[in-house]
Image (tube, grey):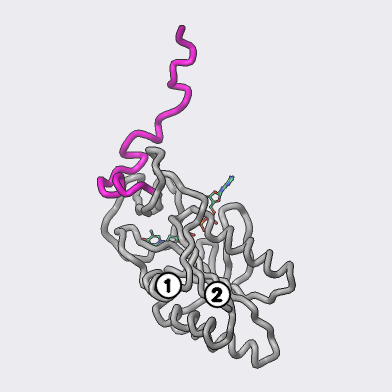
Amino acid sequence: MAELVFFTGTMDSGKSTLALQLDHNHNARGRAGLIFTRDDRAGSATISSRLGLKAAAVEVGQNTDLLNHVVQLMSAGGKVDYVVADEAQFYTEDHIEQLARMVDELSIDVYAFGITTDFRTRLFPGSKRLIELADRIEVLQVQTLCWCGARATHNARTLGGEMVVEGEQVVVGDTAVADEIGYEVLCRRHHRRRLTAARSGAAALSPDTLPFGAA
Ligand SMILES: Nc1ncnc2c1ncn2[C@@H]1O[C@H](COP(=O)(O)OP(=O)(O)O)[C@@H](O)[C@H]1O
Ligand SMILES: Cc1cn([C@H]2C[C@H](O)[C@@H](COP(=O)(O)O)O2)c(=O)[nH]c1=O
């Protein structure tokens, strides 16, 4: 039976990599797929992973009807066995409902990928609806780490390394950005205290400071 699966994890946890791997594996077995994305860092109509993989995708706009897009393709003789939906946190509730209908009415497997919460720990609308509707939620196995070594569970927005707590919910960006707006994954404890790596001084720590040379 077709299913709607939501793969989630913090930023930088390998979601887009997994999306591209999943697409590759299904394709290799003759299954026809369609990749949707919205506001990927690499630009419009692209799905990209930090491991260097990239592929063309259908860019989702505010008024895109995902179900209709697939129905049109199939009516024109196209085959769609599965759909990959990356950056799904940016989708509207309507988009997610269209994905669910794709599963139920067209028997297409839908694999959605995205972060659940924003820099203020609030659910994105697309992720909220996915949590409500998905048949299955899979948390990425690759754990990202807070600077303290604990598992990172939250996404902080930073400016020059300092955590910011005000601003628009959507600001496309990357981790490991020094001077401009960027993101850093943190454990809840340090997210709550607004303690980023730069603020804690952890970024300056180096194994060279260990007293290996001492008698
Ligand atoms: N130089 C590297 N060597 C090995 N793995 C890397 C390297 N750079 C990034 N990665 C892996 O890629 C992951 C990020 O993948 P990506 O698909 O871009 O994440 P997401 O879509 O969740 O933001 C990192 O967690 C890490 O496991
Ligand atoms: C926390 C947070 C993130 N974003 C943006 C930043 C990136 O463009 C994406 C996440 O991409 P990734 O592939 O999971 O790294 O989301 C945002 O707009 N608002 C936020 O609060």
The residue located at (44%, 58%) in the rendering is 173
| Amino acid type, callout 2 | Val
Whether residue 180 is visible: no
The residue located at (44%, 82%) in the rendering is 97
User: Which residue sits furthest front?
Assistant: 1
* Magenta span: 186-215
Considering only vertical position in the picture, is 190 above or below 122?
above
Considering only vertical position in the picture, is 136 above or below 205?
below
What percent of the width, then of the height, locates residue 170?
37, 66
| Amino acid type, callout 1 | Leu
- Residue 190 colored magenta? yes
Q: Is residue 36 left or right of residue 78?
A: left
Disc 1 designates what residue?
130
Disc 2 designates what residue?
110
Q: Is residue 182 left or right of residue 192?
A: right
Camera-side residue: 208 or 137?
137
Label 1 element class: helix
Label 2 element class: strand
- Residue 55 colored magenta? no
